[in-house]
């Protein structure tokens, strides 16, 4: 059974710092991995999706990497800003296929202090 | 364009009452998902609709929970005889054949 773990559970950094959020999964036979952002009281916003054949994806100040063999992904945020404060979730498809429900980690709550 | 919408945004009900939660997916999306997010818990899968196929109900926690998707578009999640442990945020998502799931803002359900 696939399990997704995220560490740390919470992180507080001063504005301007570069930071790394970690995600690990127990079954390496994943089709893709997705990173989401959730603001308080809101739904989820997709940030990056990495296919199993890719090693990384970049969007602006965000860079996500994937190491299937070790069951790990990282989300790198450069030059953090107070507006980056949110909970970040990673997720993988449950059946190893391209569609179907996602299995989520419990998230990392990020606070960026001005 | 319009994203996934859900209604109501908040619902307060008494224990034992039935509730219906609605999800309007992005137009043309063939797949629709329901998840639940309880306080302090991660997101939990409930049910998945794909086109005209039979839904995957493997995540429904009890037979008090059911869902329909009419005409391949709007979906309704029904919880019968609500219990306090049903209190959570219920999130709906939709997707095309591409992999990204797009989430709605959720319905916050409080059972008193």
Image: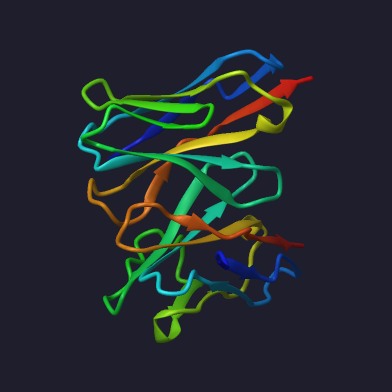
Left or right of A95 on screen, residue A44: right
Which residue is painted at 44% across and 26% down in the image? A63
- Give the quadrant of residue A86: top right
A6 to B88, vertically: above or below: above
Question: In x, y percent, where is residue A38?
Answer: 61, 43
- Give the quadrant of residue B82: bottom right
Q: Residue furthest right?
A: A114
Which residue is painted at 25% across and 39% down in the image? A30
- Scheme of image coloration: rainbow
Question: In x, y percent, where is residue A107?
Answer: 54, 33
Quarter of the picture containing the N terminus of chain A is top left
B32 to B85, vertically: above or below: below
> Looking at the image, how many numbered discs can be counted on the residues?
0
- Give the quadrant of residue B110: bottom right
Left or right of A63 on screen, residue A52: left
Question: In x, y percent, where is residue B56?
Answer: 32, 66
Which residue is painted at 33% across and 52% down in the image? B99
**Front in this rendered view, residue B78 or A46:** A46
Q: Residue furthest front?
A: A60
Which residue is painted at 57% across and 68% down in the image? B2
Question: In x, y percent, where is residue B60?
Answer: 43, 63
Quarter of the picture containing the C terminus of chain A is top right
B80 to A86, vertically: above or below: below
**Front in this rendered view, residue B22 or A60:** A60
């Amino acid at each position: 059974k696939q399990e997704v773990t995220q560490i740390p559970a919470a992180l507080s950094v001063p504005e301007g710092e570069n930071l790394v959020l970690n995600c690990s999964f127990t079954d390496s036979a994943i089709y893709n991995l997705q990173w989401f952002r959730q603001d308080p009281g809101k739904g989820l916003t997709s940030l990056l999706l990495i296919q199993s054949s890719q090693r990384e994806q970049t969007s602006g100040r965000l860079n996500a990497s994937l190491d299937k063999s070790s069951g790990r992904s990282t989300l790198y945020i450069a030059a953090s800003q107070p507006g980056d404060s949110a909970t970040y979730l990673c997720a993988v498809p449950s059946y190893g296929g391209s569609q179907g429900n996602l299995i989520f980690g419990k998230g990392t709550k990020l606070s960026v202090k001005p | 364009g319009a994203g996934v919408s859900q209604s109501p945004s908040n619902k307060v009900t008494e224990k034992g009452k039935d509730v219906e939660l609605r999800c309007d997916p992005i137009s043309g999306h063939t797949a629709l998902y329901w998840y639940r997010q309880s306080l302090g818990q991660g997101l939990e899968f409930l049910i998945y609709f794909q086109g005209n196929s039979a839904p995957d109900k493997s995540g429904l926690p009890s037979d008090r929970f059911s869902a329909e998707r009419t005409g391949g578009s709007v979906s309704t999640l029904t919880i019968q005889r609500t219990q306090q442990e049903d209190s959570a945020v219920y999130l709906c998502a939709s997707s095309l054949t591409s992999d990204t799931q797009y989430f709605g803002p959720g319905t916050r359900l409080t059972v008193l």
